[in-house]
Amino acid sequence: MLRVEGPTGFETGDASLTVSEVLSKPSLSVSPYPFLLEFDSLHLTCNTSSKLAKVVWFWNREPLRSNPQIQLSDNNRTFAIQRIVRSDAGIYQCEVSKAAFIEMSDVTYIEVIYGPDTPVIQTDETSYAEHSKLSLSCKAVAFPVEYSWFHNGKELSKGSVLRICNVTVLDSGTYTCQALNGLSHRMANATLEVEVVASE
């Protein structure tokens, strides 16, 4: 109880003073870190000094919606996704609030390493006249991804596009595009049969 005196020194009454806890800015802990593979488990912890503060999670600047894949525990301080997928990548934050105080953590960007899915080889044709130009391109859904080209099992070049400016009959055969995710060490292949017709 606090005794309050008026300007003349006379007591004017009693007043109670409540001291509210000042919240500090929360921080996020991420596990595993720094690389998160698709279908791994993601665990986030909102670190706050207050045991009574309310915790709300945000994804891409919006309050996180309820989802059966999401598990919250420890009064919402711990956030988990048991099988994260590529669409779960984005910006995560937590907000703590108590009475009139609200504090939000810095953003944490979660990248999901995924793929490669089966690549697709694109070409205008599979039969070429001798001395013509061959051009093949390869595309795989993955993050990140590297490409290698093989002809009848022998490596030719790196990159998503393969060009041969002056083909001969020796260039006939099986072309393989290999897509590699260098972080997950996963790979996927696609093949294409190409025929080079000899000039008469």
Image: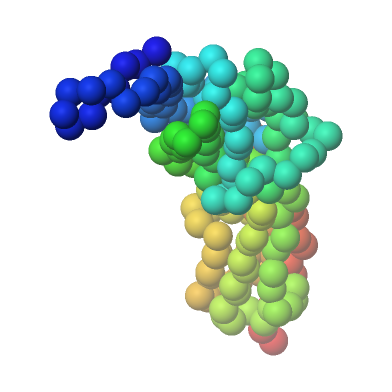
**In-front residue for pair 112/11:** 11
Q: Quadrant of residue 85?
A: top right
**In-front residue for pair 8/89:** 8
Residue 196 pos. (x, y %): 70, 73
Q: Quadrant of residue 54?
A: top right
**In-front residue for pair 87/46:** 46
Q: How is the image coloured?
A: rainbow
Instruction: Tell me how many marks there are.
Output: 0
Q: Tell me the quadrant of the picture where the C terminus can be found.
A: bottom right
Residue found 28% across the figure and 21% down from its top:
11
As drawn, the residue found furthest toward the bottom would be 200
In the displayed structure, does residue 178 sit left or right of residue 118? left
**In-front residue for pair 37/181:** 37
Residue 43 shows in the view: no
Residue found 48% across the figure and 18% down from its top:
50
- The image shows residue 61, relative to residue 52, as above or below, that is below
Residue 52 pos. (x, y %): 56, 18
Residue found 44% across the figure and 16% down from its top:
49
Residue found 77% across the figure and 62% down from its top:
193
In the displayed structure, does residue 105 sit left or right of residue 70? left
Residue 8 pos. (x, y %): 16, 29
Residue 121 pos. (x, y %): 70, 63
In the displayed structure, does residue 22 sit left or right of residue 42? left
Q: Tell me the quadrant of the picture where the N terminus can be found.
A: top left
Residue 51 shows in the view: yes
Q: Quadrant of residue 139?
A: bottom right
- The image shows residue 78, relative to residue 140, as above or below, that is above
